Image (spheres, rainbow, N blue to C red):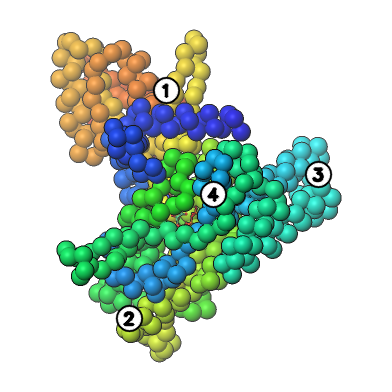
Amino acid sequence: MANNEDLFKKIIAHAKEYGFVFQSSEIYDGLSAAYDYGPNGSELKKNIRDYWWKAMVQMHENIVGIDSAIFMHPTVWKASGHVDAFNDPLIDNKDSKKRYRADVLVEDYMAKIEAKIFKEVAKAKKRFGDSFDEKQFLETNPRVLANQQKIDNIKNRLYPAMDKDDMAAIKTLIEDLGIACPVSGSKNWTEVRQFNLMFSTQMGSVAEGATEIFLRPETAQGIFVNYLNVQKTSRMKIPFGIAQTGKAFRNEIVARQFIFRMREFEQMEMQFFVRPGEEMKWYAYWKEQRMNWHLSLGIPAEKFRFHDHEKLAHYANAAADVEFEFPMGFKELEGIHSRTDFDLSAHEKYSGKKLRYHDPELNESYVPYVVETSIGLDRMFLAILSNAYTEETLEGGNSRVVMKIPPLLAPYKIAVFPLTKKDGMPEKALEIMNGLKSDFMCFYEEKDSIGKRYRRHDAIGTPYCVTVDHQTFEDNTVTIRERDSMQQERVAIDKIAGIVAERLRAKL
Ligand code: ATP
């Protein structure tokens, strides 16, 4: 555990040092749970967003995009259930004065028990080798069964209490489990209270005439309220999808863990409208599609897992998270939800406008069902950063930190260097860069030794470094050095673009 915490700290420090992520308003000591993306970070973030857009919109003829406003009519949030139910239960520790989500305290407690089960499985796997039958082990091992029983008992108390908004029952559960504050170690808790996560503000210039409006806590509602506009103007036939990326705001109770949980963050969401009754087929389809998207980036499959929800939101009939192994363990990266016709029906009711689809094949009108994929762009950014961060010891005892960012997403694709600042090399290097920069983000630099320049580009994940040397003037070739293998090759200048483009081709 300590090692992973160290790793996380190193990643955060690296993200700052190399212009990926800064604390918001740092010169004023920062604003909690708000972050700014620096030059390399904003490139990486844009590339992730573009790659998502490409997979969802460009690769699917039946998905189109929109860009809706952050401010929406306040009734939208009444209809969606956010005004009444977008709450988290909070609890304070009286000694440390730290605030927690009461349900997360209990879930963390369950995760510790679950970790014991994983440990047993890992031990047994080692002991039995190939003959190990994990399913049978989980069903029969007494220690595993006892722990599983403990988890089930807790779930049977937590989730009904959450559903019934029974804050006193959650408090009793925390007391019965003997959960202590991780900071003070004490069990001196306040009562549990509901807390609405939406930020509100006033719209209108005079206080009396102003309306309370909300900063959207998800981008999805902008899609729902535009569903008919888009369907009609784009002449879409069911099944079809609408995609959107944009900022969302949640007044999170506990917003630690860097960009994992922020109060202002960006989502990439897609709502797929389907015939009622066909939602499970599409739910399975999108689970698979989204996992393939993650794997297409070359991140090892064992870093991902699905977590199927047992406790469903009132509007969902199936839901799963794609979890990623962040430095602090497996956590939700993306949600895939079968949301039924809950949102569209609610908007019909509250707006008094019909939001139906006339299905020409069935010759029938209905409110479509919706399967949603929803991923946090900042969480994806953190997944990429934490998977990329690698410390390597090189031959000769040197070491390097290399960010093994998928080349397609790297902030810069090519760095161009003159070997020395003399003999026309800088001019030649600039000429090469100018020929490449309309197709690739390029970086020119001539300061310090080539080795140091390589290290700087390893640290920001630039997949290729091109160096102009004396031989360039004899045969129009340069060396091209690949980030991960550190292999150098001599290639003709007019081959550089092709080599890099091949490596950057999306494997969707
Ligand atoms: P969590 O349980 O972690 O609070 P959630 O289940 O509330 O997340 P959703 O409402 O399903 O999240 O939102 C979809 C995605 O948006 C999440 O999978 C996550 O990637 C991202 N997301 C949600 N809240 C935040 C946040 N506070 N900061 C950064 N990303 C977030």
Residue at mark 4 to residue at mark 3: CA–CA distance: 49 Å
Residue at mark 1 to residue at mark 3: CA–CA distance: 41 Å
Residue at mark 4 to residue at mark 2: CA–CA distance: 39 Å
Q: Nearer the viewer, residue 226 or 93?
A: 93
In the image, is 98 to the left or to the right of 221?
A: right
* Mark 4 burial class by Cα count in 10 Å: few <14, some 14-19, many 20+: some
Q: Is residue 286 something one can see in this rendering?
A: no
* Mark 3 burial class by Cα count in 10 Å: few <14, some 14-19, many 20+: few
Query: What residue appears at the point 63 percent right and 52 percent down from the top-left corner?
Result: 106
Query: What residue appears at the point 47 percent right and 67 percent down from the top-left corner?
Result: 85
Measuring from the top left, give residue 193's x and y in whole percent: 52, 59
Q: Name the residue beneath numbered marker 4.
A: 92
Q: Name the residue beneath numbered marker 1.
A: 487
177, above or below 420, in the image: below
> Is mark 4 in CB contact (under 8 Å) with mark 3?
no
Q: Could you tell which of marks 4 and 3 lies nearer the N-terminus? A: 4
Question: Label 2 amino acid?
Answer: Ser
Residue at mark 2 to residue at mark 1: CA–CA distance: 62 Å
Q: Nearer the viewer, residue 326 or 46?
A: 326
Q: Could you tell which of marks 2 and 1 lies nearer the N-terminus? A: 2
Q: Is residue 440 something one can see in this rendering?
A: yes
Q: Quadrant of residue 192?
A: bottom right
Q: Could you tell which of marks 4 and 2 lies nearer the N-terminus? A: 4
Question: Label 1 amino acid?
Answer: Gln
Q: Secondary structure at mark 4?
A: strand
Q: Name the residue beneath numbered marker 2.
A: 351
Q: Secondary structure at mark 1?
A: loop
Q: Quadrant of the N terminus?
A: top right
Q: Name the residue beneath numbered marker 3.
A: 131
